[in-house]
């Protein structure tokens, strides 16, 4: 389905500013639809012959729709849109005519011209028409609530025709706001309440006001109710700003453990301020859940911080033990354990600074790679390079994957580039068609290097660790290898990560480890989808 902007740019000659104004209307017209108990359709002229295109539609939540089918993208002309032509050409709201039928549904047509005010604040030309179509199949004697809804809807419709609705949106303000059904309060020009819906009355009672709202000065009431004087003053100032014809930002009022969100809108049909419309919503439970989530998030991050500290303590104890061990083999084993524990601590350190159970993995890989070159038992200076991005990974994948990469990087450095006393020369492979060069200093491009590559494809993470070292021994068997590091790698890849690993000779010499790790876990795994 094409968007409003796509349809307008493809079929009309509207200016970007005109299209932006239509977007603002479509972003705020659910209010008018609910107050009108009617469908709203946004029509733009296509040709001079009276053809119109529907670029947006909204259905009421307070009444049945007049249209079962979506009308967006429909181009119509002739007598079917005569009312739209009158509103567009004469610049006035059209309410004449008999009901029309859509299948078995009788409907009443209205047409509201849409204007965009000029930079000087004057009403500009008509750029579109809002069709207000009411389903008459459930017509009944209106109640006091419905009469106030319809009266307010007529005022807002006139403001659309004047170019003063919707008011400008404040920076950082989202479209989330109280709806008509949450609670509606109508004020006169002096700020006194002339009508309050039952839901609005209930919301104020949650704040501690038990009397009826009608006749109350709402700005003064907000000052009295708010637990925080500054908060009460801001809420009251918002009411007063709306009475002056301004569009104030939304405010929250906290009192007696309850929280209410308010939105004040000026009512100034034909440019005359006649009062304000205040929408209210009881958001006590929402804010309570928000506070619970904030507390939970802080607790989780504190746990990760403590786990990181504990792991670092374990690593320090192992390091001290390694210094006291006389056997070289035991010392090497303890030092390897120190590195493994430290790599896991990196993940928890990152999680302790994150707002969710996911980590930006590229930084962790870079730190693990840097540490591998510093602590590896080799006299050769090995460069580390990362190609591609791991992106954000869930904690359950990151913790195991960092251990796998730590082992593979250490193996690549230590066994791909052994110390000078273990090899007569460093076997650095040369590009195809060239004689291998023993001394890597001859050509900087052939210096010892380990490259970590990563890319995502179809919910799979593909990783390779490639070195240009001496390569795998002729009798190497990854499945039967007895080294603890490779056993850890195989166990984590095939077990925790549900992935695969292949160790093979590199295309241009050296060794390449290729991993494939699924990023989405199935229900059978007993894990959530990341």
Image (spheres, rainbow, N blue to C red):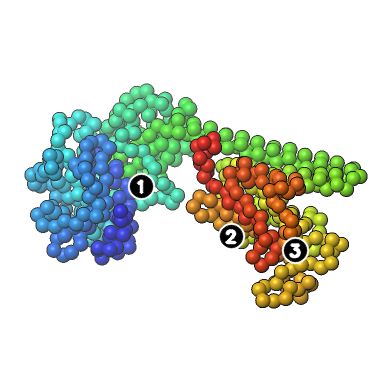
Say if residue 159 shows up in the picture. Answer: no
CA gap between label 2 and label 3 equals 25 Å
Marking on residue 388: 2
Residue in the picture at 86% in, 41% down = 321
Q: Give percent across and percent down for residue 254.
A: 46, 32
Residue 204 sits in quarter: top left
Residue 76, given in percent of the width and then of the height, sits at 16, 56
The tag on residue 247 is 1
From this view, report whether residue 260 is shown above or below residue 462.
above
When asked about the image quadrant of residue 188, the answer is top left
Residue at image location 87% in from the left, 62% down from the top: 421
- Determine which residue is flagged by label 3: 470
Viewer-side label of 1, 2: 2
The label shown at residue 437 is none
Secondary element under disc 3, as helix, strand or loop, is loop
Earlier in the chain: of badge 3 and badge 1, it is 1
Above or below residue 527? Residue 49 is below
């Amino acid at each position: 389905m094409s968007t409003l902007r796509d349809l307008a740019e493809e079929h009309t000659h509207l200016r970007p500013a005109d299209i932006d104004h239509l977007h603002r209307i479509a972003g705020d017209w659910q209010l008018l639809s609910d107050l009108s108990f009617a469908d709203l359709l946004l029509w733009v002229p296509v040709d001079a012959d009276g053809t119109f295109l529907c670029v947006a539609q909204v259905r009421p939540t307070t009444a049945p729709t007049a249209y079962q089918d979506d009308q967006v993208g429909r181009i119509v002309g002739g007598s079917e849109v005569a009312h739209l032509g009158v509103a567009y050409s004469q610049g006035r709201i059209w309410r004449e005519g008999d009901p029309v039928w859509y299948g078995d549904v009788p409907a009443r047509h209205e047409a509201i011209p849409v204007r965009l005010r000029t930079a000087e604040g004057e009403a500009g030309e008509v750029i579109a028409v809002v069709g207000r179509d009411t389903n008459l199949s459930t017509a009944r004697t209106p109640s006091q609530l419905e009469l106030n809804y319809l009266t307010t809807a007529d005022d807002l419709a006139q403001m659309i025709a004047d170019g003063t609705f919707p008011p400008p949106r404040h920076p950082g303000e989202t479209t989330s706001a109280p709806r008509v059904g949450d609670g509606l309060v109508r004020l006169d020009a002096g700020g006194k309440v002339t009508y309050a819906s039952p839901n609005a009355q209930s919301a104020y009672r949650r704040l501690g006001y038990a009397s009826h709202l009608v006749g109350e000065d709402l700005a003064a009431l907000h000052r009295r109710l708010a637990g925080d004087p500054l908060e009460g003053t801001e809420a009251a100032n918002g009411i007063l700003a709306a009475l002056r014809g301004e569009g104030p930002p939304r405010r929250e009022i906290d009192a007696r453990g309850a929280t209410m969100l308010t939105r004040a809108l000026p009512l100034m049909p034909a440019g005359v301020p006649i009062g304000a419309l205040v929408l209210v919503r009881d958001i006590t439970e929402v804010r309570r859940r928000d506070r619970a989530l904030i507390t939970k998030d802080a607790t989780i991050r504190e746990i990760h911080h403590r786990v990181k500290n504990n792991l670092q303590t374990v690593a320090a104890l192992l390091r001290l033990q390694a210094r006291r061990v006389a056997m070289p083999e035991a010392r090497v084993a303890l030092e390897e354990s120190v590195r493994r524990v430290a790599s896991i601590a990196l993940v928890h350190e990152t999680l302790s600074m994150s707002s969710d159970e996911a980590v930006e993995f590229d930084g962790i890989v870079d730190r693990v790679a840097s540490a591998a070159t510093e602590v590896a038992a080799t006299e050769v200076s090995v460069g580390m390079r990362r190609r591609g991005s791991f992106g954000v990974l869930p904690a359950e994948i990151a913790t195991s994957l960092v251990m796998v990469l730590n082992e593979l990087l250490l193996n690549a450095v230590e066994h791909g580039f052994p110390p000078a006393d273990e090899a007569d020369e460093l076997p650095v492979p040369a590009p195809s068609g060239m004689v291998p060069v023993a001394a890597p200093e001859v050509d900087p491009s052939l210096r010892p290097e380990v490259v970590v590559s990563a890319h995502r494809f179809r919910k799979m993470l593909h990783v390779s660790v490639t070195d240009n070292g001496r390569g795998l021994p002729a009798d190497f068997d990854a499945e039967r290898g007895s080294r603890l590091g490779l056993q850890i790698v195989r166990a984590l890849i095939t077990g925790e990560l549900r992935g695969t690993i292949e160790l093979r000779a590199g295309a241009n010499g050296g060794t390449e480890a290729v991993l494939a790790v699924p990023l989405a876990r199935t229900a059978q795994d007993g894990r959530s989808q990341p």
